[in-house]
Amino acid sequence: MVLCALRRQLLSSGSSCGAWARLLQRQSRGCVYSSVHGFNQEEIREKLQAFPGGSIDLLKQESGVAVLTVNNPSRMNAFSGSMMVDLEERVSELESWADGKGLIVEGAAGTFCSGSDLNAVRAISNPQDGMKMCMFMQNTLTRLLRLPLISVALVEGNALGGGAELVTACDFRLMASGSVIQFVHKHMGLVPGWGGAARLVRIVGSQNALKLLGGAVKVDPKLGLQIGLADGVLDAEGDAGSLLQQAENWLSRYTKGPAPVIRAVKKVVLSGRELPLTEALRTEKDVFGTVWGGPANLQALASKSKHK
């Protein structure tokens, strides 16, 4: 919705953000699937809404950092069907949040997320509905990763199955002491379907991804740091404040500064990751043009902050 409007605006603006516009045009709202692929979003939304329970809560703070909470404690924060729809709606809200700079994704009540609620999974276990759910969640988590916000997953307790896939849809991952990330899909006779395998390979490399998926390995904070799945470890028993406060402090080093600059940083990194080199270079030039001579740039020049 919002990205569709942005895409039209960029396409009509000529060469000002040409490569970025082409990226949005090719990805259509940042999504992977559309009606061209036989995907009807409203149809699968209606089917998923039939399996209620829990919620995905969003708190947007004046600091420009939002907190997204997976909230279904009675099911270890497993995704019900309605929660999948909730997540898509919360991502849409974040796409339209012009002042946003950062995002923390957490689970409620001391655990991250245990994947899909088996009640909903059993109800849509036929291949046709399973594929539709797969496409819906791939679209949503791809849009989450492509947000112009710097995001971090705060992993407390267990991140299992789809919960492990969710952590890969963030730019960074922080693990609390005692937490575990585990791709348990093999135990369910499955492979990841929400894009987790493709993202995992980009994060830890193909060899480590094969080990984690093929062995359903339990990744604790030590192993997470070793293979690059974790970017930091937080002490759940320490005196440094709550885990959420620790995560906000950790993220602040990357979100400090004006929103247009932070969002520009995310855009050039995104284009470098997803576009061919020539287009990524053109996008970098176009995004550079949006901040060169801008308020933050002029203020920095006046204060000579480069050398501080």
Image (cartoon, rainbow, N blue to C red):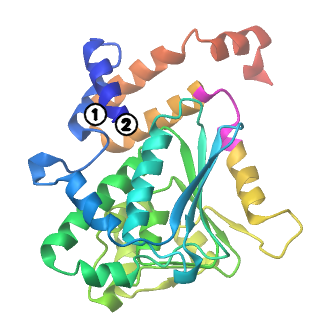
Assign the C terminus to one quadrant of the image. Answer: top right
The magenta segment: 253-259
Q: Where is residue 184 shown, x and y percent of the image?
A: 40, 84
Which residue shows up at 45% across the image and 38% down it? 95
Q: Is residue 219 visible?
A: no
How far apart are labels 2 and 1 at the CA level?
Answer: 8 Å
Q: Where is residue 259 shown, x and y percent of the image?
A: 61, 29
Which residue shows up at 71% across the image and 43% down it? 253
Q: Is residue 62 left or right of 66 when viewed as pictured?
A: right
Q: Is residue 106 above or below residue 116?
A: above
Q: Nearer the viewer, residue 269 or 8?
A: 8
Report the amino acid beneath label 1.
Leu
Dot label at residue 84? none
Report the amino acid beneath label 2.
Ser
According to the image, label 1 marks what residue? 23
Image marks 2 and 1: residues in contact by CB distance under 8 Å = yes
Counting residues from the start of the chain, the first of labels 2 and 1 encountered is: 1
Q: Quadrant of residue 9?
A: top left
Q: Nearer the viewer, residue 239 or 57?
A: 57
Which residue shows up at 27% across the image and 60% down it? 46
Assign the N terminus to one quadrant of the image. Answer: top left
Q: Which residue is outermost to the bottom? A: 187
Dot label at residue 271? 2
Q: Is residue 160 left or right of 206 when viewed as pictured?
A: right
Q: Nearer the viewer, residue 146 or 133?
A: 133
Q: Is residue 294 above or below residue 250?
A: above
Q: Are there few (<14), some (14-19), or many (20+) residues within 10 Å of tag 1?
A: some
Q: Where is residue 161 shown, x and y percent of the image?
A: 41, 78
